[in-house]
Amino acid sequence: MSTAKDLFIIAMDPEPEHAVGQGDLSLALAGAELIDLVGTGDVAVDGDRIVPGGASAPDDGLLGEAAARLTRQPPYERIEDWLWRRGEDLSSAYRAALEADGELTRRRSGLLSLGRERVEAVDTPARRRAVDRRDAREPVLTALASAVGIDGGRPGEDPGLDDEAVTSVVAAVHDAVMELEAVRQRRTIENAAFANVWRGP
């Protein structure tokens, strides 16, 4: 399993401290993919740029897709730009892939079969590995979870990362999530102001 799939699985915890937004999760998933590609040598990080290495064929389909979408000509892509480009609707892609692999199931909440449908992680070896990584406070997974508020993570918490490239990616994920939250708040204020205009004095 990839770090991104582990992150998605722990985000599906039945009782998270707060729901994780799809946009936040998508940005963190893109960061997780990039970190895994750094680990396999497919990319290196030079400052804030993603420098492709040798083109490999990762076993994981979504990770292979991420590797195929790297910008391979200079000037290379900035980490932040990659997160926004690759992260677009990425949580939906991971949900579909994990459902297809039998790692997620759809359940309805409430007593009636007509209740609201939710997706839950199935108790599989992959889920247990993801939970073990979370419970062991594995630094990379902890840092990415912190970016989206999973498991009580706090932005700015030092997860003990010892790799400069990974640290750069995690910092970019935190910045992107905060930027997305700022956009949400701005829209809320604008919508409230618009509603007030229509209501009148």
Image: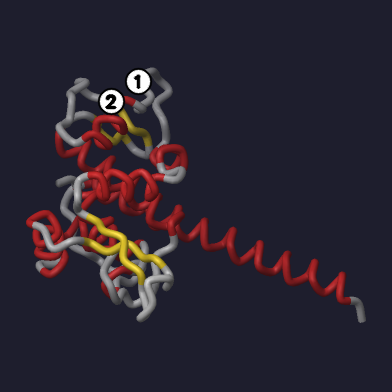
Q: Residue type at mark 1?
A: Arg
x and y, in percent, of residue 169 in the image: 31, 47
Residue at image location 16% in from the left, 65% down from the top: 134
| Mark 1 residue crowding within 10 angstroms, few (<14) / some (14–19) / many (20+) | some
The residue pinned by badge 1 equals: 72
Q: Between 78 and 182, which is closer to the camera in this rendering? A: 182
Q: Residue at x 19, y 50 (%)?
A: 102
Vertical order, 136 against 161 (above or below):
below
- Taking depth in this image into account, of 141 and 175 the one nearest to the observer is 141
Q: Give the image location of residue 24, x and y in percent.
A: 42, 57
Please name the residue shown 16% across and 39% down the image: 39
- Measuring 19% from the left and 36% from the top, which residue is drawn there? 60
Asked where in the image residue 13 lies, by quadrant, the reply is bottom left
Residue at the top extreme of this rendering: 73
Left or right: 34 with respect to 195?
Answer: left
Q: Position of residue 42 (x, y in %)?
A: 21, 29
